[in-house]
Image: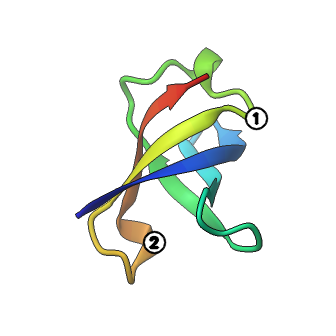
Amino acid sequence: MRLKKGILKSFNSTYYVATVQLASSYKVYLEGVTVARNLPATEMVVGRKVAVVLFDEHNPKEAVVVAVYV
């Protein structure tokens, strides 16, 4: 399990999933990343910094956005 910083690129409030650009990668986006339901949708503003937990670094579907910050 690894914690990574990222930038929120899009957020779908219906399915509570996001597209995230990891800080270590400027060309690759993770799409369909699950967002923790305790994060208010109003805080999920494009361009904000997010914390992403990767349970399996080789499978982006095992990632979760756990925090949003400025």
Question: Pointer 1: what residue?
Answer: 46
Check disc 1: other Cα within 10 Å, few if <14, some if 14-19, many if 20+. some
Q: Quadrant of residue 47?
A: top right
Q: Position of residue 44 (x, y in %)?
A: 63, 28
Residue at the image point whose x is 66% and y is 41% from the top: 12
Q: Position of residue 10 (x, y in %)?
A: 73, 45
* In this rendering, position of residue 50 left or right of residue 59: right
Q: Quadrant of residue 31?
A: bottom right
Question: Pointer 2: what residue?
Answer: 60
Q: Secondary structure at mark 1?
A: loop
Q: Quadrant of residue 46?
A: top right
Residue at the image point whose x is 27% and y is 65% from the top: 55
Q: Which amino acid type is marked by label 2?
A: Pro
Q: Secondary structure at mark 2?
A: helix
Q: Which amino acid type is marked by label 1?
A: Val
Mark 2 → mark 1, Cα distance in angstroms: 20 Å
* In this rendering, position of residue 21 left or right of residue 2: right
In this picture, is 7 found above or below 47? below
Q: Which of the two discs, 2 and 1, labels the residue nearer the N terminus?
A: 1
Most extreme residue toward the front is 24
Most extreme residue toward the left is 1
Is residue 13 visible in the rendered image? The answer is no
Residue at the image point whose x is 39% and y is 60% from the top: 63
Is residue 4 visible in the rendered image? The answer is yes
Q: Nearer the viewer, residue 30 or 11?
A: 30
User: Which quarter shows the N terminus?
Assistant: bottom left
Residue at the image point whose x is 57% and y is 60% from the top: 32
Cβ atoms at labels 2 and 1 below 8 Å apart:
no
User: Which quarter shows the C terminus?
Assistant: top right
